[in-house]
DNA sequence: ATCCCTTCGTAGCGACGTTACGGTCGATCC
DNA sequence: GGATCGACCGTAACGTCGCTACGAAGGGAT
């Protein structure tokens, strides 16, 4: 087998278990059965090796993505792309951190390719007349949000234990970029009685739409408390 | 001068010029005129030193933020907080990377404090009935987008040469999480249904203004149910 | 003055990324 | 066929890193 492949395989394996800083070139060389100078002649640098590892991993991930042909709905493709991005980040956390953390001086080609891919989808959205902003700007907005969601989940798992927040962020960003501009400032903060009004509102909405996550008895007790809270301000008729 | 302060000053100065990996404890000790064991007895670790540096820098930044009292418009406060976050990141890039990149094993207290601060503002939004999702979820969404925008600008300056994309992302996220103050009539809020928003609103208002007509135990159970109802409309991909 | 306890600097350890140097081996030329 | 040369590769080393064991210096109590 090629020495380059052996080194890349060994480095990939080690990088799956530890962060890039904890993967030493010595360990890579030993795992690959190769002397140190070989590694440096092939990749020049530890950074070069890591970049090559990330690029190869991302290339292999792109194969599955290229198989999925663009559908007729570019916005759906956009959301699929977001979800794929999140899944790649969660499946290969150390590879992903190398792509989007500044640990590497030169960003790996994988990052640029991901950017270009997103840009392509947004170009199709723009061609369909669905974008409210130029596709370059939309690319930056979506990519920054997507990277932020992924990095947040990777670096603070205890604060982001659930992927669903990412779906919410995804819809927030994409909906506001693809729907006609609706930037009405919510200035009219009509603040009346705080708790009673909110309680009355919730009670009414629960009556119109009975909750499925609560038992009938719980819902009944909840309604009773809401009544108490709604009356707590001034007695309403 | 205290040795601790001398070390922190030296480390801060060096960290302003180079990334954390390129700041050696030897250089810090020499710049501070202190032996190496002093540093390790005071901070335990290089990571401990860096965390202390970041915390002190962030504390000093918080002073200006604490001076600005919360205004009557919590959504405006929210946007101001976003912009302050961006400015801090651009003003102290290496400090910021330490806060939100995984280079530190233990996240500095500054990160948790920033999270708590954002959560507080969003609690006020929720209490005003302006939030369409529970404040915890909104905190995650806004924080992830904000961090993503800042880290994108820091690590890929050539791709994000303009801060204005951050303002666009900010408005996208915040506008979609906030709705004009609701007073009582259930105007449809698209996805998620009307119940979750109303439940989140009431929960926040109860947190700001504990009910006197319910016992502590009842209030706790009520909060639990409200949390369930607020999450009942979660988007499921 | 002596003793002890705290405090701090020198010197060193192991591991890291990286590279100079010498040896091995197959191809080429007489 | 044997000698020569050049490409290739492993050993061993260099400088630097984070970190720490140990001995010297200083100050209070007796």
Image (tube, coloured by chain):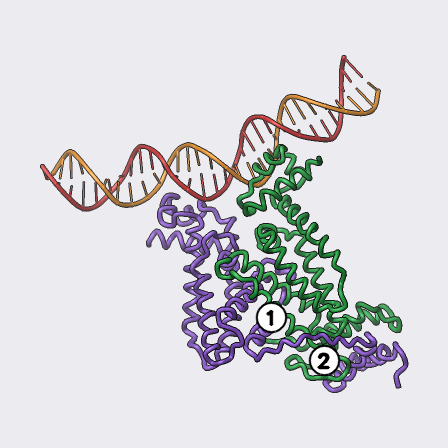
Chain colours: A purple, B green, C red, D orange
From the top left corner, tell me how far across and down residue B21 is, in percent: 54, 46
Cβ–Cβ under 8 Å for marks 2 and 1: no
Q: Write the residue at 34% across / 51% down.
A: A3
Tell me the tag on residue A169.
1
Indicate the quadrant where residue D6 lies. Answer: top left
* Discs 2 and 1 carry the same chain letter: no
User: Which chain letter matches label 1?
Assistant: A
From the top left corner, tell me how far across and down residue A177 is, in percent: 55, 75
Residue count near mark 1 (Cα–Cα under 10 Å), binned few <14, some 14–19, many ≥20: many
Q: Write the residue at 54% across / 60% down.
A: B152
**Could you tell whether B229 is left or right of B40 in the image?**
right
From the top left corner, tell me how far across and down residue B31 is, in percent: 60, 36
Which tag is nearer the camera, tag 2 or tag 1?
A: 1
Indicate the quadrant where residue A227 lies. Answer: bottom right
Image label count = 2
Q: CA distance from mark 2 to mark 1?
A: 20 Å
Look at the picture and state if D2 lies above or below A156: above
Q: Write the residue at 48% across / 78% down.
A: A74
Tell me the tag on residue B195.
2
- Secondary structure of the residue carrying numbered label 2: helix
Q: Quadrant of the N terminus of chain B?
A: top right
Q: Quadrant of the C terminus of chain B?
A: bottom right
Tell me the tag on residue B231.
none
From the top left corner, tell me how far across and down residue A217 is, in percent: 79, 81
């Amino acid at each position: 087998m090629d020495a380059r492949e052996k080194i890349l395989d060994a480095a990939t394996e080690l990088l799956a278990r530890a962060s890039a800083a904890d993967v030493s070139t010595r360990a890579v060389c030993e795992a690959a059965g190769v002397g140190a100078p070989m590694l440096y002649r092939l990749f020049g640098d530890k950074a070069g090796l890591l970049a090559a590892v990330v690029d190869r991993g991302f290339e292999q991930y792109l194969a599955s993505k290229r198989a999925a042909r663009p559908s007729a709905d570019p916005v759906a493709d956009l959301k699929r792309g977001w979800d794929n991005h999140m899944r790649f980040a969660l499946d290969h956390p150390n590879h992903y951190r190398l792509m989007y953390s500044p640990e590497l001086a030169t960003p790996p080609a994988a990052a640029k390719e991901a950017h270009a891919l997103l840009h392509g989808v947004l170009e199709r959205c723009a061609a369909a007349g669905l974008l409210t902003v130029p596709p370059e700007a939309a690319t930056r907005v979506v990519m920054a949000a997507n990277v932020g969601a992924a990095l947040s989940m990777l670096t603070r798992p205890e604060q982001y234990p659930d992927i669903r927040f990412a779906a919410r962020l995804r819809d927030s960003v994409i909906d506001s970029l693809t729907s006609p501009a609706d930037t009405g400032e919510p200035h009219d903060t009509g603040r009346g009685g705080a708790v009673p009004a909110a309680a009355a509102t919730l009670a009414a909405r629960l009556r119109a739409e009975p909750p499925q996550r609560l038992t009938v008895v719980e819902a009944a007790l909840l309604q009773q408390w809401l009544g108490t809270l709604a009356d707590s301000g001034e007695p309403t008729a």
